Amino acid sequence: MNKSKKATSIVEVLVIMLIIIIWVIWMYNIFSKWQTLSNTTANRIQAIWMAREWLEAMINIRDTNYMLFSSSYSWCWNTINYNSDCVTWTPNSISAWSYKIYQNSDNKWYLSGWIAWNYSDINYRNFFKVWVDSNWLYTQSWWTDTKPLFTREIKISYPSVDKMNLTSLVQWSDSSKNWILKVELSTIITNFKNKN
């Protein structure tokens, strides 16, 4: 009878250990999925901020053009990279194209265009990649030691002469590299000071 009590005790201990192991594995899966969800949410929030920054930068470009070329709002509101040729009635406007935006040493926003393919193309990812600078700000004008996660592009089209349609597109792949995630924000800016 003493041997059967020992056998029962060993079986009970094994069952309890099995239950604890199953519970630990279950908790690990829950925390792992929670961590993945947390990372995905954090990346989406960062992507929204980056997309909004591009829209605000384009509004800043328009407003800076207004200040620099107040003699010709109708031709200069959308001149590219603050080109003063617009004043002499040879408009050098921002084309309907895909661009990245960067700041020069004069702290003005500048555009650099590219024939946009898609995220799966390595040339696209290299041109539109986003780095983090030493101040923890997002930039596309130089690289740092951080690994880029996002790409960011601004797509421009013109529904009419005095309206610029802006689409700010931020893309990244998830940790498994199986899914391409994106945030796309759009707005229309106008030439509200259209006068000669």
Image (cartoon, helix red, strand yellow):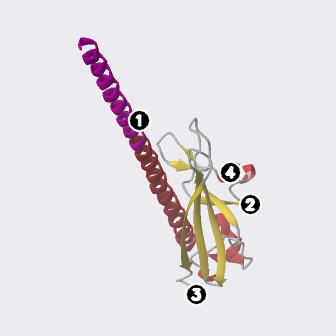
Q: Quadrant of the C terminus?
A: bottom right
Q: Quadrant of residue 116?
A: bottom right
User: Residue 28 colored magenta?
Assistant: yes
Residue 120 has which mark?
A: none
Q: Earlier in the sequence, mark 1 or mark 2?
A: 1
Which numbered dot is residue 125?
A: 4
- Compared with residue 45, is residue 20 higher up or lower down, i.e. above or below? above
Q: Nearer the viewer, mark 1 or mark 4?
A: 1
Give the residue number, with chain letter if any, for mark 2: 117
Residue contact between numbered discs 4 and 3, judged by CB atoms under 8 Å? no
Find the distance from the CA under tag 4 to the CA under tag 3: 40 Å
Tag nearer the camera, 1 or 2: 1
Q: Residue furthest top?
A: 2
Disc 2 or 3, which lies upstream in sequence? Answer: 2
First in residue order: circle 1 vs circle 4: 1
Q: What kind of residue is marked 4?
A: Arg
Q: Label 4: how many residues lie within 10 Å, few (<14), some (14-19) or many (20+)?
A: many
Residues 188 and 193: in front is: 188
Whether residue 177 is visible: yes
Q: Which residues are magenta?
A: 1-30
Residue to which mark 1 is pinned: 25
Judged left or right of residue 124, residue 11 is: left
Q: Position of residue 192 (x, y in %)?
A: 52, 83
Between the residue at mark 4 and the residue at mark 2, the CA separation in whole angstroms equals 10 Å
Residue found at the far front of this picture: 1
Q: Quadrant of residue 72?
A: bottom right
Q: Along the horizontal axis of the image, is 13 left or right of 175?
A: left
Task: Look at label 2 and name its amino acid.
Answer: Trp
Residue located 64% across and 68% down the image:
155
Q: Check residue 195 in the rendering and tell me which mark sits there, or answer none.
A: 3
